[in-house]
Amino acid sequence: MHEHLLFGYPAVNAAWPNSFDRAGAFARVVRLLSEARASGVDTVVDCTGVDTGRDAAFAAEVAQTTGVQVIMSTGFVLDVPRYFRGRSPKVAADFFVADINDGISGTDVRAGIIKVASDAARLEGLWELLFRAAARAHRETGVPITTHTDSSQHSGLDQQRVLAEEGVDLSRVIIGHSGDTEDVDYLERLLDRGSYLGMDRFGMDTFADHPMDTLQRCMVIARLCADGYADRLVLSHDATCYCVHTKGQTAYETAAEALAWWDRTYPDQRPARMTSLVIPTLLEVGVAPADVDKMTRNNPRAIFEKQTPY
Ligand SMILES: [Zn+2]
């Protein structure tokens, strides 16, 4: 429910095309998604923003080659262009609606989800503007919203406040990266307002401020399931199948070195680990098979089946 085929830098890549090895990226993404397909993953949601290299033509080719369905998003991650300064949320909302109704960047690939992001406790500035735009596009089209949060900042709560102010039914929203915390009180506050939670960073053990491995992440899910929330959780890795941006201390000169760093640092951050590692660990810590089914099949289906505008 939250992966990335690519993580890129569109302005840099457009200015200097040799900064992006498309063929190399394609081969790597196809390899990782084929591995996922063989392990039982039928569909991935690509939550890549316009600011981080969303590429519908690339995704369509990957889907045709691997047989994995890819649901594309419209929206932004954290690097909102200054283009939107001083503009009404309607400007961004109209862009999102066009991606949803007409297709992305001249392709016939239509966006199936709206992605917005914030990293702070309080939603302000361009991040807030985009949440208001996402709310309008969502209400006009019925397409669900998925978010990026910093769970250490409890960002999800203020995201819910702004979306609710815009009249959004919070049960049509996934508050993402909620699996990065063991603060169950925070998570249950979000759930009690009706939203889904993305427990979606399996394999990013050392990425957040508070490192969490697969077992710790599964224990939190087991607790939420025991508290009756299995019908509100969705699972993922936030896997960046091709990413040359590292958080390491070394200044890598080549994409190959950066990719090797990802593979060393996050060996379990790949879509195929859902069936080979995440689900077995959930079962081990006592999550019922029926709850695993809800989180991996029924809940995603329910999220995408609700398409009524309001
Ligand atoms: Zn992401």
Image (cartoon, helix red, strand yellow):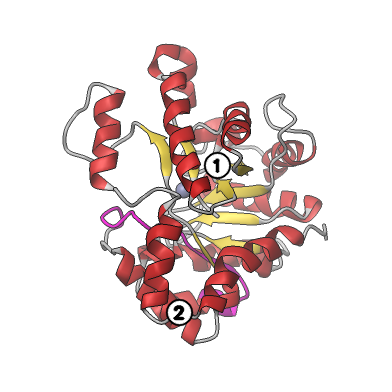
Residue drawn at (47%, 57%), measured in percent from left and top?
236
Q: Is residue 20 above or below residue 306?
A: above
Q: How busy is the neighbourhood of tag 2: few (under 14 within 10 Å), some, or many (20 plus)? A: many
- Secondary structure under tag 2 reads loop
Q: Amino acid at mark 2?
A: Val
Residue that numbered label 2 is attached to = 287
| Residue 9 seen in the current view | no
Tags 1 and 2 touching, CB below 8 Å: no
In the rendered structure, the answer to whether residue 114 lies left or right of residue 258 reads right
Q: How busy is the neighbourhood of tag 1: few (under 14 within 10 Å), some, or many (20 plus)? A: many
Residue drawn at (60%, 47%), measured in percent from left and top?
130
Residue drawn at (62%, 26%), measured in percent from left and top?
57
Residue that numbered label 1 is attached to = 76
| Residue 131 seen in the current view | yes
Mark in front: 1 vs 2? 2
Q: Position of residue 286 (x, y in %)?
A: 41, 82
Q: Residue furthest front?
A: 38
Q: Quadrant of the C terminus?
A: bottom right
- Secondary structure under tag 1 reads loop
Q: Is residue 15 above or below residue 295?
A: above
Q: Earlier in the sequence, mark 1 or mark 2?
A: 1
| Gap between marks 1 and 2 measured at Cα | 34 Å
Q: Which residues are magenta?
A: 190-208
Q: Position of residue 192 (x, y in %)?
A: 58, 80
- Figure quadrant of residue 299: bottom right
